[in-house]
Image (cartoon, rainbow, N blue to C red):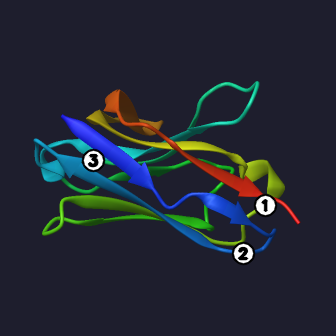
Amino acid sequence: VQLQASGGGLVQPGGSLRLSCSASGFTLADYAIGWFRQALGKEREGVSCVSRGDGSTYVGNSVEGRFITTTDNAKNTLYLQMNSLKPEDTAVYYCAIGSAAVVPGVGLKCQFDSWGQGTLVTVSS
């Protein structure tokens, strides 16, 4: 199982960036997939998750309306389109796979158990 994230870099506030995550050795469509991030000195934060079955999604409150997660099953690749970037979005971003379940009254809960090397996103002027 190998996941490789790429596409990070330096971007100005208000700008956009698209991260890619290529998977090898397995099929992304067989798992719940998504992204999490970790800023320096801070705890890990969930960014997004898409379940395998019905496509239920979770989007973190801090990125809702700005970040979009998509997949290209033919390329076995996951993407994170990030728009209207803010300095507080600065972090290392990781793509991950695992399992997910809908919890009544809560929504989609994801458990990631495998992830690749992250890619650094820096939002600064």
Amino acid type at image mark 3? Ser
Look at the numbered disc 3 and give the secondary structure of its residue: loop
Q: Position of residue 19 (x, y in %)?
A: 48, 61
What separation in Å lies between label 3 and label 2 (alpha carbons)?
28 Å
Image coords of residue 115 (percent x, y)? 36, 33
| Residue hosting label 1 | 86
Q: Work out whether 97 lies above or below 34.
A: above
Residue 116 occupies quadrant: top left
Quarter of image, res 92: top right
Residue pictured at 32% horizontal, 59% vertical: 78
Label 2 sits on what residue type? Gly
Residue to which mark 2 is pinned:
15
Mark number for residue 51? 3
Residue 32 spot, x, y in % from top left: 26, 42
Whether residue 78 sits left or right of residue 74 in the image: it is right
Residue, far bottom = 15
The image shows residue 16 at horizontal and vertical percentages of 64, 73
Residue 106 as seen in the image, left or right of residue 61: left
Name which of mark 3 and mark 2 comes first in the sequence: 2
Q: Is residue 5 left or right of residue 101?
A: right
